[in-house]
Image: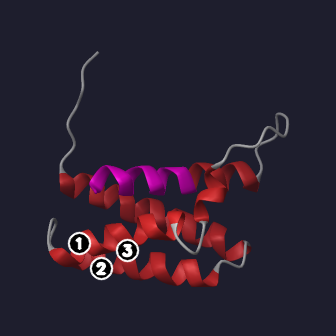
């Protein structure tokens, strides 16, 4: 198996894209406070230099949105509801992707 190392810039870009996918799904769940945190983090990630204090804080804010008061981690749990792809599975996949990328960047 070959392991391909990704650059910090690529991972940041992937995290921003993943946040942009997750936000509309959270809007349907009425997670307005968490959306504000994630949107601000994505904005900071777009403008901050990788490994700067602002960049690291934005990544920490994303992880905190999942593990802290907003408890977005509950959306990452898979639910076995049969064979149909539903919004629940889409939300689970999107939230797990955001959390995984943010943890990788810490």
For mark 2, what is the residue?
44
Magenta segment range? 95-106
User: Where 33 sits versus 57, above or below?
Assistant: below
Name the spot of residue 60 as percent of width and height, x first. 35, 68
Determine the main secondary structure of the stretch shown in magenta. helix
Q: Residue visible at 43% across and 49% down?
A: 100
What is the secondary structure assignment of the residue under circle 2? Answer: helix
Q: Give the CA distance from mark 1 to mark 2.
A: 7 Å
**In the drawing, what numbered circle is on residue 55?**
1
Few, some or many C-alpha atoms within 10 Å of disc 3 (few <14, some 14-19, many ≥20)? many
Sequence-wise, the earlier of marks 1 and 2 is 2
Few, some or many C-alpha atoms within 10 Å of disc 1 (few <14, some 14-19, many ≥20)? many
User: Where 61 sits versus 103, above or below?
Assistant: below
Q: Tell me if residue 101 is in the magenta stretch.
A: yes
Q: Quadrant of the C terminus?
A: bottom left
Q: Tell me if residue 7 is in the magenta stretch.
A: no
User: Where 10 sits versus 61, above or below?
Assistant: above
Q: Is residue 48 visible?
A: no
For mark 3, what is the residue?
42
Q: Quadrant of the N terminus?
A: top left
Name the spot of residue 89 as percent of width and height, x first. 70, 48
Q: Are marks 1 and 2 in contact (CB under 8 Å)?
A: yes
């Amino acid at each position: 198996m070959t392991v391909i190392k990704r650059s910090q810039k690529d991972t940041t870009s992937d995290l921003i894209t993943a946040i942009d996918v997750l936000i509309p799904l959270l809007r349907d769940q009425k997670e307005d406070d968490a959306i504000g945190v994630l949107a601000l983090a994505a904005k900071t990630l777009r403008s901050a230099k990788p490994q700067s204090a602002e960049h690291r804080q934005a990544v920490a804010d994303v992880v905190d949105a999942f593990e802290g008061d907003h408890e977005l981690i509950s959306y990452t749990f898979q639910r076995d509801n049969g064979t149909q792809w539903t919004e629940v599975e889409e939300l689970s996949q999107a939230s797990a992707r955001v959390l995984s990328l943010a943890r990788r960047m810490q």
